[in-house]
Amino acid sequence: MAEDEITGAENQLCEGQKAKPKFKSKKEEEEEEIPYLAVELVINILLRLPANLLVRCRQVCRSWCEVIDSLSFAHKHQASYHMEEFRVVYYETRSHDKNLYLLNIDEPNYSFRRIRVHPMIADSHMLCWLDYIGYGLFYVFCNGQTFLYNPIRGQMLILPLTLLSTSYGLGFDNATNTYKLVNVLLLEGKYWIQVYTLGTSSWRQISAVPPCEFDWHLAPVPAYGDVHWGSKNLIVSFDLKKEEFKSTPLPYRDRFQETRDYKLFDFRGALAVVYESYSFSSYSAIWVLKDYDNNSRWAKDYNIRPALSSRYVLQVTAWNDGMIIGKGENLFYYDPKSDGLTTLDNEGFRYVNGSEMRNYTGNLISLKNYGDLA
């Protein structure tokens, strides 16, 4: 299986760039002369490149390295549209397979390219637990310690000690350009909520309480800068700016769907819901939340035929103009233009039920700006 090149052996400092000779011949100067580009134009060009390529671009020259390593550039890049937006990452959360994989599709086949993981994860003889929590970052529990992992940079940030987590999520406050982790612990019927702002020294206990119980067995979904969990009749969200919970009603469900499970997922930056279908359904509807901040308006954007009926949890992620659907031990591609499902075949790798597929966007932030690395 081929290895993907997204992870960086880039831990060199910008000061480590090779110095230019002090004196050059006129011929050498003419050969090496590069037309001058304004810094603003260079930044505009670099913002259009995917994160894995930008890690390599650090090695071009010191000025590029300093631009790419700046937090302001990383925040702009994360917020902008670029080529990696709909890449799909695949992993097994609680498995001895400690690898991450990127999905590549060449219809009607698919393949996974292995992402090199941090040696601390790969070489551990203990079970490591990892989950993608958004913004190009993974939450890792390994050898009794929790970490934040950025595979683009190859960095593991050691997180402060905290309560044993029931559920956790990552959000981004764009008003202050800060990342925050929320840790939810349900103990003897009581919720304990902690918040950790990246770059600080400890977790903070807060008094916020969820409006209802939610399904903490499944990883929350990051969207709109907040963290979201599914519950029986509502979506429970944690607002990272206000550090409080809010709720959003689910889209319309008929009397049959009230007893069915549903999948909450991030669809091109928005929250989306697909209901598990009953056996006599002709299609499955995918609802997308159009107005999170105001009216919480849902729109039924897709009717997938045939219906997605499965005794397993469905996995749905965006891919190009359509979406990838994991159902049982099979993968399908849904094309909205033809309104049809195509089975994706791969003889060398089988999709494992119970694994996770998420839309992945690389993040350029250097975790060494926020604390000690493993």
Image (spheres, rainbow, N blue to C red):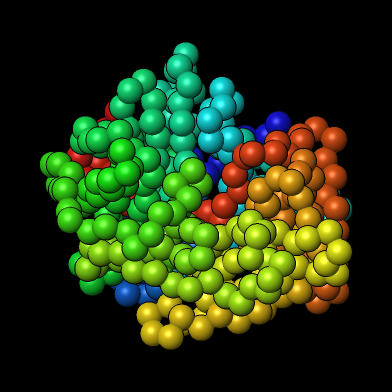
The answer to whether 10 is drawn above or below residue 219 in the figure is above
> Taking 327 as reference, is 268 left or right?
left
Residue shown at the point (86%, 64%) measured from the top left: 280
Instruction: Please tell me which residue lies in front, 244 or 41.
Output: 244
Image quarter in which the C terminus is found: top left
> Taking 168 as reference, is 1 left or right?
right
Instruction: Please tell me which residue lies in front, 201 or 216.
Output: 216
Image coordinates of residue 321 in percent, x first then y, are: 70, 71
Image coordinates of residue 62 in percent, x first then y, are: 29, 51
Image coordinates of residue 213 in percent, x first then y, are: 40, 54
Residue shown at the point (70%, 59%) measured from the top left: 276
Instruction: Please tell me which residue lies in front, 66 or 207.
Output: 207
Image quarter in which the N terminus is found: top right
> Taking 76 as reference, is 5 left or right?
right
Instruction: Please tell me which residue lies in front, 88 or 209.
Output: 209
Residue shown at the point (67%, 59%) measured from the top left: 260
Q: Is residue 274 visible in this depiction of the protein?
A: no
Residue shown at the point (69%, 39%) measured from the top left: 353
The answer to whether 173 is drawn above or below residue 294 in the figure is above
